[in-house]
Image: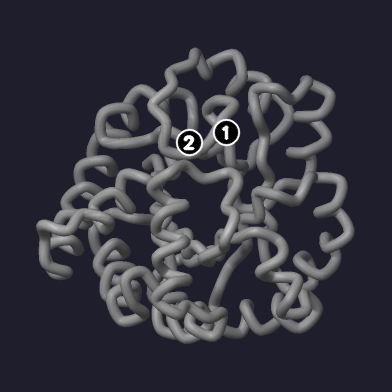
Amino acid sequence: MKNLVAYITSGYPDKNFTIDLALTLGESGVDTLELGVPFSDPVADGPAIENANHKALELGFKFQNLLEISEIIAPKVDTLWMGYFNSFYQQNMQKLIPHARELGVNGLIIPDVPHEEALAYKELFDSNKMANISFVAPTDSKERIKEIVSDAKKFIYMVAYTGITGSGTAEDLQPFLADIKHYTKTPVYVGFGVNKKTAKEKVKGADGVIVGSAFINILLGTSLSKQEQIQKCATLAQNIKEQINS
């Protein structure tokens, strides 16, 4: 069974909506929820997620909201926090990681921290049984891939192409996947540019997919009610989960 990871922006449009959406996605085929932490300059994200980040901040998102959301959903849905390092650093990593674990959060995804810098926090994550998700990109050499994945936890975030999230750029991922899997047995999930149209192709040879912009685009639409948005996201999750396992 191949896994589906869904990204949603915490607090957009509000905390209660995020909770309802997260729990519904957990019942609709999503194996892991990536709770995005709104940030003013989300450099790895495309226009849709950047827009949702800015809107959440304009609506008054505070880090405390993330904790409140996580307290409710993390015991019910496998939950990771996705955010940029400054958001976490400001909370004091030595205190934040144990607190996240107490809430039931299983790991962090921090795209702006290089592997070498992430090693400084390895003991902190390991001692709290938390994953600091590793990224590999097509630009990485085989030697670097070997180094990055040697002690990867939970899953490896395979960037499907060089760029930002949400683009539909197509690449032949099989040689890249083969290089990763040569050095690790940790599951490899494909992210960036995964949607209903591309999921079946992108997941070939991989263990799962990470979908973000496809969900966020639904939430940014103005023609649907909140309940209709949640239902549309649920249907999308069901469709993608079916596709990647058919």
Q: Which residue is mark 2?
A: 192
Q: Which residue is mark 1?
A: 159
Tag 2: Cα neighbours inside 10 Å, few (<14), some, or many (≥20)?
many
Q: Quadrant of the C terminus?
A: top left
Q: Secondary structure at mark 1?
A: strand
Label 1 amino acid?
Val
Q: Secondary structure at mark 2?
A: loop
Q: Is residue 161 left or right of residue 15?
A: right
Above or below, 173 relative to 25: above
Above or below, 99 relative to 23: below
Image quarter of residue 167: top left
Q: Residue at x 19, y 63 (%)?
A: 230
Could you tell me how many numbered marks the image carries?
Answer: 2
Q: Is residue 46 left or right of residue 159?
A: left
Disc assigned to residue 168? none
Residue 232: image x %, image y %? 16, 54
Q: Residue at x 78, y 38 (%)?
A: 148
Label 2 amino acid?
Phe
Which comes sooner in the sequence, label 1 or label 2? 1
